[in-house]
Amino acid sequence: MPLDMKDKENHEQGNDPSRFSGKWNHWKSEFRTMWQTGLAHLNIWTHKKHKSFSQTYAFYQIGQYLYSVGFGAEYAAVRFYRATKSGSKFCWHGIKWATGKVVKECGRMLGELLEDVAGPILAIGKGAKGLTQTLKTQYQNQGAAKAAKHSAVYLGTGFVKYLQVLGRAASYAMPVVGILLFAATVNEKLNETYTLAVECNGQIVGYVEDELVFDEARDKVKSRIVLAKDQQWDIEPTFTLATSKEVMDVNHTADAILMASADQIQEATGLEVDGQLVAIADNGTELQQYLSSRKAEYEEPDNPNLRVEFVQNIQTIEGLYASETVQSVQQVENMLSGLKEEEQQYTIQSGDSLTLVASKFGLTSAQLKDLNPKLARTDYNWPIGDTLIVHQEVPFLQIKTIETVTKDEVIPFSTDKKDDAELAYGKTVTDQKGQDGLDRATYERVRINDVLVEVSEISRIRIKDPVTEIIRRGTKMPEGSASDTAVFGSGNMLWPVPGYTGVSRWMSAGHKGTDIRARYGTPILAADSGVVTASGMNAAGRGYGNSIIIQHGPGNRTLYAHCSSLAVYAGQSVTKGQVIGYVGSTGDSTGNHLHFEIYKGGMLVSAKNYFPNK
């Protein structure tokens, strides 16, 4: 049958091959999916079980390990306990057995020792008892001679019989006797006093307890011997070991050493000046008398306020000195009475000057300046209390006198000047009169070798207070003046030509003022505040040329002459430092300069009193 017909028949009968193939593939696919899903679930379940099993197994292994460790430790502890217990029992039995053996042996040896030592004694006692009985019996039966002979035979027999026993007893007794003798000898030696024998200059001078006492005594000796500079004491005591029941203390030992070296030292008196040993005299009493006589030259017994002392710190020291350094008192006095070069300081007092201070110390002004370069400065004004170095030949011992002086001092009253614009210029009114005060001052005056070197105030008591004087002074200027009121001067002068200090002539018997050299046209300043009372050609007098007079207060005025021109006029009030004119050469003048005059309290005074450094 043809193929297409067969397929058609199969299709009609429901046996279509393509249809069966499709179902089979579908079932096959479903089965494969189910299989793979089952395998996946199986794998998951297996993995979980494996993981759980692994964890359980690990815990099991750890537990097994810990159990093994614990069991091993417990078993080791049990074994150690058993071994210790067994060893202890063994040791205890061994010690017990050894102790028994030692005790038993010691008991045996002690018994033998007692037997050996006590045997001769017992034998002697037994023999003595038997000898006594035999001697008594023989004496009664045969007489004294027979008894004595029998006793001698008896003793000889006993000695021979117990000779060996006595030897053994002696072998025990001799060491005991030796130990006793040794102990007695040591005790005797220990009771002896061991000391140090002190030797000086080859001879023993005594005994000391120990080396500490020796060292202290030697140091004490060295401290008691006063040596001059660069001098050494060559006596050196030594010691050796010795025995003596009598020992010396530190002081007695030092004395013994000094006595042994008496040929090199002697008692004398040292003289220290400012801590330095300068001389050693053989007679301290005479030296003290000489020092007292030196101070007595300056003492005043009737003046209780005067005390005399040495400038230097003088001390006399009694002691032991090397014989070769000791001098006679006369030699020491000659040295102390001599002179020496010394640099001194002087404290400046009120009124001192270069020539005055130089003359006090026998110096020239140039020599004093060389010692004190500050004196060459132009601004040095000899301040009180400042010190200067002076150099002169002075006594070896300088005497200082300190005198306390009390005196009453007047305290000048002060003046309070008050300007009164209602009062005419030049007039004054005293509202309160001044009164001087009084102080009781105590000073201490210090002189060295009769030269006053210092004065210091130690106390001051006010007895009476000063009363201030109160004065009103008029400042009202006359009508028509340039100013209504005047200004009074302070009293402190200003150099009238600043920048020029050259002075051709100071005030003298033939010259009334001070001539200050300056260039033509240099400004002239008012030396102090005040009122111009005169201004113009020859206003100050004939020959003064252009001149100015300024009134600074009652009795106080200044004069300026030979000006080239003037800057102020009469009646004008001026202040200190104000330009009042210019330098020139008018009037009786031979060159440009300022002729300057000062009047104080109505009296002509030199400008050098106000300007000492010009």
Image: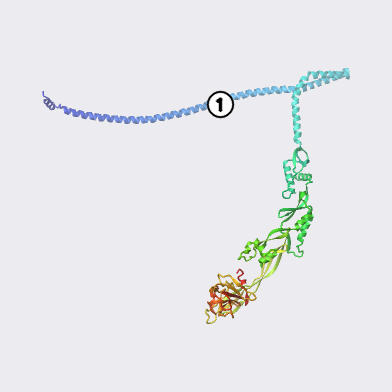
Q: Is residue 42 above or below residue 416?
A: above
Quadrant housing residue 563:
bottom right
Task: Tell me the quarter of the image containing the N terminus.
Answer: top left
> Is residue 30 toward the left or the right of residue 396 in the image?
left
Q: Nearer the viewer, residue 246 or 44?
A: 246
- Name the residue at 62% across, 24% down: 95
> Is residue 426 toward the left or the right of residue 71 in the image?
right
Quadrant housing residue 512:
bottom right
> Is residue 20 toward the left or the right of residue 41 in the image?
left
Q: Nearer the viewer, residue 141 or 291?
A: 291
Q: How is the image coloured?
A: rainbow
| Mark 1 element type | helix
Residue 48 at x, y = what percent?
34, 31
Q: Amino acid at mark 1?
A: Thr
Task: Tell me the quarter of the image containing the C terminus.
Answer: bottom right
Mark 1, residue position: 84
